[in-house]
Image (cartoon, rainbow, N blue to C red):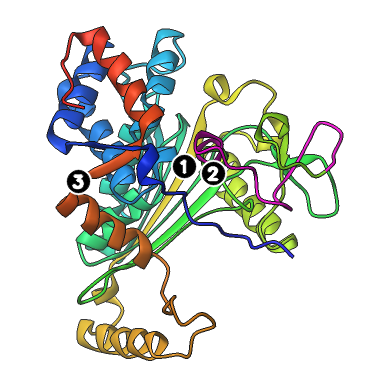
């Protein structure tokens, strides 16, 4: 039986260290060149680099060219105005106006945080947006304010099989929860509803590794470990992942005024994406001291549980990525050499000399 999780590959012999300052400067220059306002270019760059720091390079700066190409094709409007279509003290419906997903998602989460601070919870949906990268970076915005955050996104056409079928029924939607802790890593659950994400399969191929068995199907509906033949992903935990993906599609595609994945017929760059954000101001529900004392006690007890592998301690969701972030900040950001070379090629567009 295959696992529904595998760690991103690491191989120092194939990796290059990239300094964070020049990386952000490069990304901002590239986005500004396409017409983005500098403040929004910085938002997009920050969200991409935050994903890189967590080791999620499949949703980090490696995807920059994808967004630049979408701007070239007119699928992303670099100067889009994000419109408020409906608003109450607790909810808002936004039209992303074909904006870059990272910008629309950041604005939406900021608004959800503001509403939660005022009335206890805040819910914001966004339609007519674009791929927003790693879901974790948005719930961490809520966590930094001491609040609980949730988000999900409708990523495109139906590429994840229905349980009991070999055909796509829903998109590989991401979901993320973030919960603040008093010390150490915050609790962050960030997952695709399939057994893995398309970006992680690209990372596997980049490192010369196959698709793990039991993860994907080819054009004929047969299991494949060859990333070049993958057409459909299998849902995580069978009917559970399939069900989660459907709920995500409803909260985004239907509730935001967009489409469910099975009704999307065009490529995701053209159809766009929808997003859902929900924030809870915990101190309006319970005394913060009680909340954190209870959570601290549970975390300590879980860390002390006996392990299956003595070399792998019991962890909570988000701890590995938090540790990776601390390493990246202290030791430098390591990316695959192909990732680094792609950024170097992009730098030539803005005549920027990269130090890697």
Q: Which residues are magenta?
A: 202-222
Whichever of labels 3 and 2 marks the residue nearer the N terminus, that label is 2
Whichever of labels 3 and 1 marks the residue nearer the N terminus, that label is 1
Asked if the residues shown at circle 3 and circle 2 are in contact, with their CB atoms under 8 angstroms apart, the answer is no
The answer to whether 127 appears left or right of 49 in the picture is: right
Q: Position of residue 43 (x, y in %)?
A: 23, 34
Q: Which residue is mark 2?
A: 252
Q: Position of residue 70 (x, y in %)?
A: 44, 16
Whichever of labels 1 and 2 marks the residue nearer the N terminus, that label is 2
The answer to whether 319 appears left or right of 38 in the picture is: right
Q: Which residue is mark 1?
A: 275
Q: Position of residue 122 (x, y in %)?
A: 34, 57
Main SS class of the magenta portion in the image: loop
Q: Residues within 10 Å of mark 3 (few under 14, many from 20)?
A: some
Quadrant the N terminus occupies: bottom right
Image depth: mark 3 or mark 1 in front: 3
How many angstroms separate mark 1 from mark 2 (CA)?
Answer: 5 Å
Q: Is residue 265 magenta?
A: no
Q: Label 1: state its secondary structure.
A: strand
Image depth: mark 3 or mark 2 in front: 3
Q: Label 3: state its secondary structure.
A: loop
Q: Nearer the viewer, residue 296 or 312?
A: 312
Asked if the residues shown at circle 1 and circle 2 are in contact, with their CB atoms under 8 angstroms apart, the answer is yes
Q: Is residue 210 magenta?
A: yes
Q: Nearer the viewer, residue 282 or 39?
A: 39
Q: Which residue is mark 3?
A: 332
Q: Quadrant of residue 44?
A: top left
Q: Which residue does the image show at 21% across and 10% down from the upper left?
A: 350
Q: Residues within 10 Å of mark 1 (few under 14, many from 20)?
A: many
Above or below for 355 versus 254: above
Q: Which residue does the image show at 33% across and 49% down from the upper left?
A: 138
Q: Residues within 10 Å of mark 2 (few under 14, many from 20)?
A: many
């Amino acid at each position: 039986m295959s696992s529904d999780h595998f760690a991103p590959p690491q191989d120092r012999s194939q990796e290059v260290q990239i300094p964070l300052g020049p990386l952000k400067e490069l990304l901002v220059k590239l986005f500004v060149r396409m017409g983005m306002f500098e403040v929004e270019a910085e938002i997009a760059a920050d969200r991409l680099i935050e994903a890189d720091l967590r080791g999620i390079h499949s949703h980090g700066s490696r995807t920059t060219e994808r967004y630049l190409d979408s701007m070239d094709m007119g699928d992303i409007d670099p100067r889009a105005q994000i419109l408020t279509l409906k608003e109450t003290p607790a909810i808002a419906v936004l039209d992303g106006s074909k904006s870059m997903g990272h910008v629309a998602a950041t604005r939406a989460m900021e608004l959800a945080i503001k509403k939660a601070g005022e009335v206890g919870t805040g819910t914001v949906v966004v339609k007519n947006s674009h791929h927003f990268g790693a879901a974790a970076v948005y719930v961490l915005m809520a966590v930094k304010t001491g609040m609980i955050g949730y988000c999900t996104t409708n990523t495109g056409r139906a590429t994840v099989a229905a349980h009991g079928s070999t055909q796509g029924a829903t998109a590989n939607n991401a979901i993320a929860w973030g919960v603040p802790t008093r010390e150490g890593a915050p609790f962050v659950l960030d997952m695709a509803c399939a057994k893995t994400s398309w970006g992680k399969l690209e990372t596997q191929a980049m490192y010369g590794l196959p698709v793990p068995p039991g993860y994907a199907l080819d054009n004929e509906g047969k299991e494949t470990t060859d990333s070049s033949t993958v057409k459909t992903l299998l849902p995580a935990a069978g009917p559970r992942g399939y069900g989660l993906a459907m709920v995500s599609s409803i909260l985004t595609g239907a509730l935001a005024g967009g489409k469910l994945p099975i009704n999307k017929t065009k490529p995701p760059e053209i159809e766009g994406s929808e997003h859902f954000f929900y924030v809870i101001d915990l101190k309006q529900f319970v005394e913060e001291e009680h909340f954190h004392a209870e959570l601290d006690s549970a975390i300590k007890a879980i860390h002390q549980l006996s392990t299956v592998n003595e070399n792998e301690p019991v962890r909570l969701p988000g701890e590995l990525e938090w540790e990776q972030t601390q390493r990246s900040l202290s030791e430098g950001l390591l990316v695959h050499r192909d990732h680094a070379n792609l950024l170097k090629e992009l730098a030539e567009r803005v005549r920027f000399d990269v130090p890697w």
